[in-house]
Image (cartoon, rainbow, N blue to C red):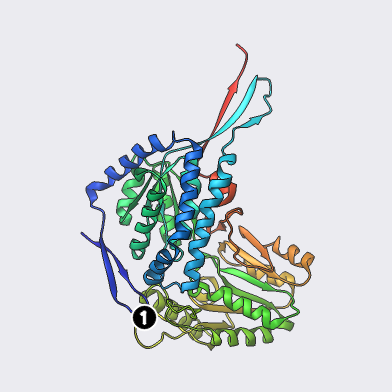
Amino acid sequence: MSTYVTTNPTTGTTENEFPELADDQVPVIAEHSAEGFETWRLTPVAERAAALARTAQLYEKRSAELAAAITREMGKPAKQAAAEVQLSADIYRWYAENGPDLLSPEQLDPQGAQESVVHTLPIGPLVGVMPWNYPYYQVARFAAPNLLVGNTIVLKHASICAASSKLMADVLHEAGVLDYAFINVYANPDQIAEMLAHPAIRGVSLTGSEEAGVAVATEAARNLKKSVLELGGSDPFILLDTDDMARTTRIAAQIRLANAGQACNSPKRFIVLDELYDDFVRGLVGEFERAVVGDPADPETEVGPLSSVSARDTVADQVDAAVRQGATLHTGGSPRDGDGAFLEPAVLTGITPRMHAYSEEIFGPVAMVYRVSSDEDAVRLANDVGFGLSGSVWSTDLTRAARVADRLDVGMAYVNEHGTTLPGIPFGGVKRSGYGRELARWGMGEFVNTKLRRTSAH
């Protein structure tokens, strides 16, 4: 039997191993989730909401423990890990407080009947296939609304997140979520495919790579199961003007280097107007070189290791390929000597459409800066990729910025901020970045039976 292995990316040492699910347990897990659904769906919504409220409290109470786990597992700097724990608590609390109202029956125009009313009901057991880059937040986005509505969940987390996925299950169960309403499994892709074929399972949500998304969506479609996908991104950061370049480049560096650049909605492409370009590149390079790279457990660290040595080497290879193809490397891009999966933050310019980096997602601490001569050129370049997760426009002229933002072919467009995620606003993309939405009322509406009851006089 293979195992889930927790290797500390800071030291390169294996800290723990967890046995993988046995093949004969796959149908058992699906049936347990179905059994849990028959009880959880009938649990009063107020009790389900109370369990989520207690989950939020436990996340805050156990914040240090939860944060330390992901710092060890995937190298998230301590302050960022603590912030992720708090964001996850906020999501559970938002659904505890706002979710019940979203489930209220909706009276429609009766249109000739006595009554036409729509009820929002759960559909059954769901599988969540989640990534390693935001171990708690990604799960909370999926789990909170679906547990509130009355669905049950089988969590298949990334193999390097075995410890944190167990912690999440422990917290939810301690908070009052039934054991069979949230089941953590250490499964492989073949077992997930088998699970999606099981009649008890009604849907799947995946956050991850395009390759994984294609595989899961194909299996879901083959079995007529609903799927939601949040995949990669190559988000544009469009700078139209600024009255404080130092502040602008500082913000740009901070949001690109957060989580060592390992975020789908990180601003990977900086698109800058001619007259600002040289100053922006100079400032961004300075900020990247000043960023503190090191032990993520140190509170002063700003950039930790990548999730693994193989992930680091993939990003380093992408930078090398861009340079070989003619791009200019201004700083960084090389693995650090010694243990761990550290990479020096890199800034690239001169990227052209013939280079791989133009259309690829670089999932690490690398910024690509492009020069454009007009707002029109900025929009054209921003939309000239297969991804469509989010994008941002930066300007002192809010009307101009909004006009540009409205033309971005993305699921989320921001003005003078980037990548903001809050429990009460939707998250999701278009094109190769996936389909469906999470968070807010939209996250509540993906895996539900919008059931009409129409009553007419006899």
On the image, the x and y values in percent for residue 407 come to 70, 61
Query: Residue at point 47% right, 83% down?
Result: 293
Judge from the rendering whether residue 74 lies leftward or rightward of residue 45; answer left or right. left
Judge from the rendering whether residue 323 lies leftward or rightward of residue 398; answer left or right. left
Q: Can I make out residue 67 in this image?
A: yes
Image height of 425 relative to 124, above or below: below
On the image, the x and y values in percent for residue 218 come to 41, 50
Image height of 418 relative to 440, above or below: below
Q: Quadrant of the C terminus?
A: top right
Describe the element under mark 1 as helix, strand or loop: loop
Q: Between residues 56 and 114, which one lies in front from this camera angle? A: 56
Judge from the rendering whether residue 133 lies leftward or rightward of residue 283; answer left or right. left
Q: Circle 1: is it few (<14), some (14-19), or many (20+) Cα within 10 Å?
A: many
Q: Residue furthest left?
A: 1
The residue tagged 1 is: 340
On the image, the x and y values in percent for residue 76 come to 44, 72
Q: Can I make out residue 329 in this image?
A: no
Q: Residue furthest front?
A: 61
Query: Residue at point 61% right, 28% down?
Result: 117
Q: Quadrant of the N terminus?
A: bottom left
Query: Residue at point 41% right, 77% down?
Result: 312
